Amino acid sequence: LLLIEIPSVHPGAWSWLNFDGGGWFTGLAIHPSGRLYGRTDVGGAYRSDDVGKSWQWLSFVFPYPSQWNTQGIAIDPRNPDVLYLALSAALNPLDPGQGLWRSEDGGKTFSRLLDTSYAGNDQLRLGSECIAIDPSDPDKIWTGSRNGVFY
C-alpha cells in the first residue's frame, strides 16, 4: 500500500480575472511573447496584452452573433498577431459566419479560410481544442469540424 500526501494548498497565487465576457471561458492560447487569447462558448474571443490583467473583446468585428460562438483558438508560434478562430453555432447548417477564420493583425480584422460547421452551443458541443498548428511547420493548420478534418 502506497500512501501519498497531497497538500491542500497548491503553490502559486490564483486570482479571479474580470474580462466582462458572456458565457463560459472555455479555452486559452498562450504565445511565448506573453500575449493571451481566450475563447468563450457564446461570448466571443478576447485578447490580453498584459498577462490577463485586462482583456479586449475581439468579436465585435463579426456581423453575425453566431460568430461569438468561438469553438477553437490557436496562435502562430512565430507571430502573436496571427490568430485562428473556429466559429459556428452549429444550430444552423447554413450559418453565414461559420468556419475557420484568420487574423494577421492581432484580431482587428479577420478573413475566412474555410467554410465548415463546428459543434457549438448545443448537445454536440466540442469538449477540446479543434485547431492545431503543426509545430514543425506552422504554415500547416489542422482543424476538426462536423464536416471532417482539414489541413
Image (cartoon, rainbow, N blue to C red):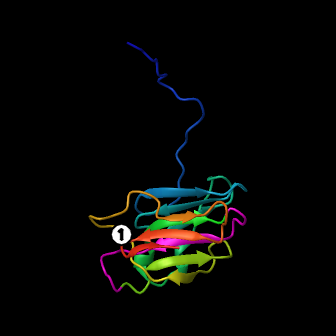
Left or right: 17 in relation to 106: left
**Toward the viewer: 25 or 150?**
150
Residue 81 inside the magenta-drawn segment: yes
Principal secondary structure, stretch drawn in magenta = loop
Q: Is residue 13 above or below residue 151?
A: above
Give residue 50's position: percent from left, percent from top.
68, 55
Total numbered labels: 1
* Crowd around label 1: few <14 · some 14–19 · many ≥20 (10 Å): many
The answer to which quarter of the image holds residue 128 is bottom left
Mark 1 lies on residue: 119
The region drawn magenta spans 77-94
Label 1 amino acid?
Answer: Ala
Could you say where residue 15 lies in the image, as x and y percent from the top left?
55, 42
Give the image location of residue 135, x and y in percent. Answer: 64, 60
Residue displayed at 54% across by 83% down: 112
| Location of residue 116 (image quadrant) | bottom left
Residue lying farthest to the top in this orientation: 1
Q: Nearer the viewer, residue 69 or 4?
A: 4
Q: Secondary structure at mark 1?
A: loop
> What residue sits 67% from the left and 76% below the top?
104
Q: Is residue 92 magenta?
A: yes
Position of residue 54 relative to residue 139, above or below, is above
In front: 17, or 97? 97
Check the image and name the residue furthest to the left.
123
The residue depicted at 68 percent of the width and 62 percent of the height is 77
Q: Quadrant of the N terminus?
A: top left
Q: Position of residue 38 (x, y in %)?
A: 54, 60
